[in-house]
Amino acid sequence: MGVLRIGAVAAHFGRDIERSLAKLAGIVADARAAGVQLLVLPDATLGGYLSDLRRPDPTSLPPGLCEDSSEIERVRALAGDMVLALGYTEETVVDGEHRLFNTAVCLDGSGVLGRHRKVHRPAGESLVYDAGDSFSAFDTPLGRLGMLIDYDKTFPEAARTLAMDGATVLACLSAWPASVTDRASRLPQDRQSRLFDLYDCARAAENQVVWVSSNQTGVMGGLRFLGQAKVVGPGGDVLARTSSKGGLAVAELDPEVEVARARRVLHHLAERTPEAYVALRAADADVPGA
């Protein structure tokens, strides 16, 4: 893999896909000028996120796209030799029915390298999106990557599964808002702001991986997004970050070297003791389909 320049984006993307593509072109150009090789954009880059998490308005949902749509093809052309991850609302037919998924896709100029459908759906998101059912790492020209979408990172098992599948870089694409029920007057003091940062650092440190966290900014309906994009090292140290406003966080490192250094003495994945996790196994056995 070697030394990489990794970029995490904080930006606002709304319903207008043409406007989003124009904005994306500018961001990609800035990232390329900064030497970025892996660029992680927010969840819902194309078409924006929901405007209400508790009672989503069925008349104002993000437009659904398929993976082979002209819009995704235009993003692929923009990417060129850069590996780029972004989120969109995927519309597909399952068992004869049209379904929507909150989806992330990773691509470069050669085509799609990997994809992920959001598994964990918060609050009213389950009224709009079907759930994905797996976490899988995938190979890219820059090494083995894994992807999650915002609420997925709340669950340690999600990132752990990708790390166990060989990913040394995990990209978490978010449209993560401030607290809906208990808002603070300033975003940095918001409870969700603290949790967003906490999960980013904890997931990197517990799995000893490089963590790339993007997020939406601005306002969509009743939701105010946090920003706070960042690149986190395998020791849980923040290497670069943005504020609550739009921006690009760029860090340069060799993921393979840094991950190997972090695991040299204490190797969290190798030192797990699955036979001791009796309650976890029992709880999973009681869940239908687990």
Image (cartoon, grey):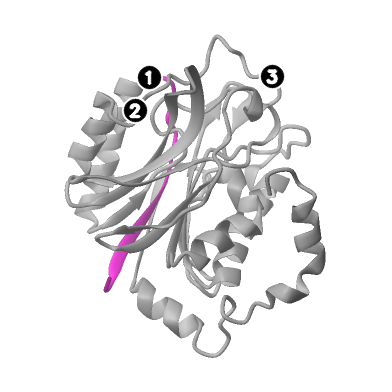
Q: Is residue 187 left or right of residue 1?
A: right
Q: Is residue 14 left or right of residue 107?
A: right
Question: Of helix, strand and loop, which one carries label 3?
Answer: loop
Which residue lies most toward the bottom here?
Answer: 265
- Residue at 23%, 32% (x, y): give it: 73
- Does the stretch in magenta take in 54? no
Rendered image: mark on residue 20:
2
Q: Mark 1 or mark 3: which comes first in sequence?
A: 1
| Residue where numbered disc 1 is placed | 16
Q: Position of residue 272 (x, y in %)?
A: 65, 77
Q: Identify residue type, mark 2.
A: Ser
Q: Position of residue 253 (x, y in %)?
A: 35, 72
- Is residue 227 positioned above or below 170 on the image? above
CA distance for labels 1 and 3: 22 Å
Of circles 1 and 3, the one toward us is 3
Rendered image: mark on residue 224:
none
Q: Identify residue type, mark 3.
A: Arg
Q: Identify residue type, mark 1.
A: Asp
Q: Position of residue 121 (x, y in %)?
A: 63, 36
Question: Of helix, strand and loop, which one carries label 2?
Answer: helix
Question: Of helix, strand and loop, which one carries label 1?
Answer: loop
Region in magenta: 1-15
Rendered image: mark on residue 55:
3
Relative depth, front residue between 192 and 101: 101
Residue 199, picture quadrant: bottom right
Q: Are marks 1 and 3 in contact (CB under 8 Å)?
A: no
Relative depth, front residue between 247 and 179: 179
Q: Are marks 2 and 1 in contact (CB under 8 Å)?
A: yes
CA distance for labels 2 and 1: 6 Å
Relative depth, front residue between 197 and 275: 275
